[in-house]
Amino acid sequence: MSSLVLSAIALACIVGGMVVGLVLRRVLPDHHLRDTSRDTVKTGAGLIATLAALVLGLLVTSAKSAFDSTNAELTQVSTKIILLDRALAQYGDETKPMRQSLKQTLERGMQQIWPDEFEYTQPPSYTVGDAQASEDRIEDSIRALTPANESQKAMREEALKHISDLSQLRWLLFEQSHTELPTAFVVLLIFWLSILFGTFGLLAPRNATVTIVLFLCAVSVASVIFLIREMNHPLRGAVQVSSAPARQALDQLGK
């Protein structure tokens, strides 16, 4: 389910709860919404509002943490690629094909994550398996090198370390990009918000201003759910990590 569809469902449920509250206000006897009864409803609404706020805060914090973590890992990947390219360059001219393959691998990965930043007639089809195969070929080529001196031997070992670290970081990014929001959290949150807005409709005066304000509040809450879902998938969607570290790495490769 896409983030837009999820937020639309949340908005429909919340607005539906508000409408039910407005309808109940019309049909309930007046004494049901006076004095002690009204205070009890307000107390219940306050409790639900607190629960919803806690869950929303937890989800926002978790989503922001996932976004920042992915951004940091992407920076580490870009740094490792630069260090790998530097190690291969210091080894000697025989590593030029590996450096060129490394640059092509990075460029294809960037095209997959940030397709809108590249111009092409046909979107690239590049999977995590393709990236793994490319890295394996580069690693095999590095292992096949025959160092002629201690300096080349050190550069070969350093390059192998960098490509091993790079593979681990890439798989970590891949696994994190497929994490999902806990379904129970989302369902309960939408349920609580629907009840909360139902009580708003039940207690609110019947006029256009109040109805519009409540609707805008419902849209705001649904947009938060959209933002949380998008930030949980920072490598795709409307809210993505910056491509700046990868672009800087791409500019440095081959120099």
Image (cartoon, rainbow, N blue to C red):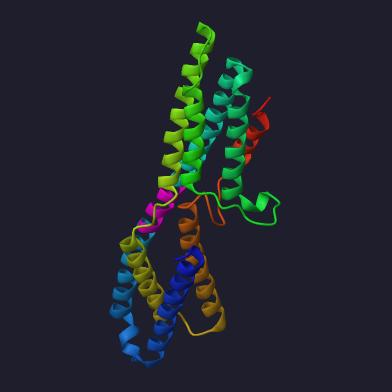
Residue 2 in the image, given as x and y percentages of width and height: 48, 64
Secondary structure mainly formed by the magenta segment: helix
Is 199 placed left or right of 254 in the picture? left
Residue 148 in the image, given as x and y percentages of width and height: 53, 9
Residue 134 in the image, given as x and y percentages of width and height: 51, 38
User: Which sits in the foreground, 242 or 188?
Assistant: 242
Q: Where is residue 75, by image quadrant?
A: top right
Is 150 placed left or right of 247 in the picture? left
Rendered residue at 63%/39% (across/down): 244
User: Which sits in the foreground, 166 or 156?
Assistant: 156
26 vs 190: above or below: below
Quadrant where the image shows the N terminus: bottom left
Residue at the extreme top of the image, as rendered: 149
Rendered residue at 43%/84% (across/down): 22
Rendered residue at 51%/34% (across/down): 77
Is 110 placed left or right of 119 in the picture? left
Q: From which residue to which does the magenta span run?
A: 55-64
Residue 121 in the magenta stretch? The answer is no
168 vs 4: above or below: above
Is 118 placed left or right of 73 in the picture? right
For the question of whether residue 72 can be seen, the reply is no
Q: Where is residue 238, by image quadrant?
A: bottom right
